[in-house]
Structures are given as C-alpha cells and as structure tokens.
Amino acid sequence: MKTKSLVLAAVIATAMSAPTMAADWFIGGGVGAQQNTYKGSYQGVDPEFNGDYSSARETENNEFYEFRVGTYLNDSSRVYGTYSYNSDDAARQQSLMVSYDYLVGLGASNKLNWFIGATAGVNHISPDFDEVSSKDRFVWGGQTGLMYKINDKLSTELGYRYLKQDYKVSGSDAGGSGSIKLQDSQQLYLAVDYRF
C-alpha cells in the first residue's frame, strides 16, 4: 500500500502544479483493445469433508474508449486526466486517472516523440452478476508509445498501457467458498489530440 500511496501522491502533485506552468492545453480521445486478466479460486467440500481446491486464470479481450484533457508543461513533459470505459463478459469498468509522460524527441524536427510515463487513479467496476455489488478501486501503472505531431494543432499517438488492478470479491455457499480477482489490464490504443 505504501507504493500505491507514493505513486498517487507523485502524480497528483504533478497534476496540481500543471496550471501554473501550463504552456499548451489539449483535448483528445482514443480507442483501443483492452485485455483484462482474471484469477479465480474455489475450495469445495465433499460429503467426507475432504477439501477440493481448484484455480483458474482467464483473459477477456474487448475494446475500450477514452477521453482526455491535459497540458504540456514544456517540450518534454505533459500531464493529463483520462476517463475510459471498457466492458467485457464479466464486468464494466469506468476509470478516472491522472497521468504524467516524459517525451523524448526522435529527430531534429521533434515531430516524432517517444513517451514514457506513470498513471494512477480510481476504477469503478460493475460486475455482470446480481450477487456482486459495484466497487471503486485504486488502479496504477504506466504507459509508453510513439506520438506524431501532424501540425501545430493536431497530434496522434500509438501507445501501450499496463494497469495493476486492486479488485477482489469472495463468497461462499453450502458447497464451499471461492474468490475472483481482476489482476491487471493491458491496453493498446490509438489516440488523437487537439492543442489550443
């Protein structure tokens, strides 16, 4: 939990200082593929009271959508907030995250940039089962990719984001007990931003 608190504090501190240092604001959106990894376990009991344990790991692949707004602090750094939506066979996710990226120019024109950064925020998970209630959970991770500046107003990027999830539910019935955990999410996305 200490690591999560430090990551969240660093991202929030950067975001709070953005308005005083802001150079260029931007607004944008993106679409991509998201892979959610679930891990489950079940401990059953037979009539002779012998424990029967099983575990499973499953991935769900679906599209996701994002909307974001942020600012370039200078030529080599940016901070932004993102709302994203994803739905798979197990749950719907809505995320509010704050991200910071460091940009490295590739070439003299600075039209092509490599970026790497950190993300932290909250994920609202709505399971597709009536027995399990919706929950808000902490999410954190990082992203990297390539950004191309089309002109002074438009840019596009291809990115990869890894998000560590913090969602787990447990339950029991007469036959035993079990739990399911959303372990992590991986996103591959294409985004377009407009500077103003």
Image: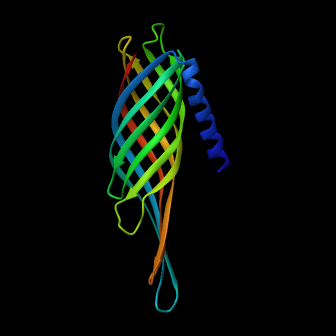
| Quarter of the image with the C terminus in it | top left
- Find residue 195 and report its horizontal and vertical position in percent: 40, 18
41, above or below 181, in the image: below
Task: Name the foreground residue: 51 vs 88.
Answer: 88
Asked if residue 152 shows in the view, the reply is yes
Residue at image point 39% right, 47% down: 35
Residue 42 visible in rendering: no
Q: Which residue is located at x 46 percent, y 41 percent?
A: 96
How far across and how far down the image is residue 47, in percent? Answer: 46, 91
- Pick out the residue farthest to the right: 2
Q: Measuring 42% from the left and 54% from the top, which residue is drawn there?
A: 125
* Total marks in image: 0
- Measured from the top left, where is residue 111 in percent x and y? 42, 13
Q: Is residue 6 above or below residue 54?
A: above
The image quarter in which residue 82 lies: top left
Q: Is residue 80 left or right of residue 12?
A: left
The answer to whether 147 is drawn above or below residue 61 in the figure is above
Residue ranking furthest to the front? 20
| Residue closest to the far bottom | 48
- Residue nearer the viewer, 55 or 119: 119
Residue 97 versus residue 116 in the image, above or below? below
- Residue 74, percent from left and from top: 54, 16
Residue 116 vs residue 56: left or right?
right
Q: In the drawing, does residue 44 fall left or right of residue 3? A: left
Coloring scheme of the render?
A: rainbow
Q: Please report the residue visible at 60 percent of the width from the left and 25 percent of the height from the top.
A: 17
